[in-house]
Amino acid sequence: MSMVDAFLAPVMTEVLLTALARLRTEGPSAPLRIGSPWLSDIPLFPGIFAGSFPFLLPGVDALEVASLLDFLKTWRKNGGEVTLLVQGYDPLAHPQKNVVTFNTQELRLLERCLDTGMEVLFGQSFHDRFIVAPDVVLSGSVNGTYPGLDRNRETLTLHTRSSSPRDYASALAVCENHLASARHMGVCRPPRANAGIAQHTSIQEIRRCYSTSWR
């Protein structure tokens, strides 16, 4: 187990690119799961790709992993599964997701992920943050947004199956529980069922609810 405190974009980028390298060499042995209350199409840290990753990812152009959405689409193109979990849009949840600009960006990102066949979940008062990749769990306080990764001072903890199997198993179980809880809610159908499995209609209804004060 290791911890990183401060500028975290390179850490997240390295974990994702390493996972992609494994996916391409070993096949889809495990899905990619990302949980973040707030999520945006963040740029990934380009300096890492200028190092060893061109050798680990032959045939992958830097533009294919330039942002989170680019990376996720490349992951899917290589046969990997993706699940995204974000905080639901229930107006009674705290803190509320009430910044229209951020919400517009997030909902558009989630729509594009649904278009590519990814699983999108809305959690009920979900505030954890994690990435689950093959044999790795990355968890901590950082949202998958520009402020979280590049501006705020946050903390991440890296659990690997090989170096800390018990901690890894414990962290993985927490993540799986969050995903299972969201799936258990069924299909997200705002304004009454604001958590669960997202569909295109779920996102359309969220937008409509904004304009009608969640009636």
Image (cartoon, rainbow, N blue to C red):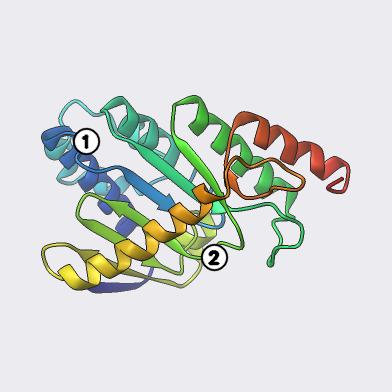
Residue identifier under label 1: 28
**Kind of residue indicated by mark 2:** His
Q: Which percent across, then down, holds residue 41?
A: 50, 42
Q: Along the horizontal axis of the image, is 115 left or right of 195? A: left
Residue identifier under label 2: 127
Q: Along the horizontal axis of the image, is 87 left or right of 74? A: right
Residue 89 image label:
none
Are the residues at dot 1 and dot 2 in contact (C-beta closer than 8 Å)?
no
**Kind of residue indicated by mark 1:** Pro
Q: Along the horizontal axis of the image, is 70 left or right of 14? A: right
Q: How many marks?
A: 2
Q: Which percent across, then down, holds residue 115?
A: 51, 25
Say which quarter of the image contains residue 21: top left
- Look at 19% across and 63% down and name the residue there: 160
Q: Along the horizontal axis of the image, is 169 left or right of 8? A: left
Q: Which percent across, then down, holds residue 110?
A: 55, 37
Element at badge 2? loop
Q: Quadrant of the N terminus?
A: bottom left
Residue density around tag 2, few if under 14, some if 14–19, many if 20 or more, within 10 Å: some
Residue density around tag 1, few if under 14, some if 14–19, many if 20 or more, within 10 Å: some
Q: Which percent across, then down, holds residue 74?
A: 33, 30
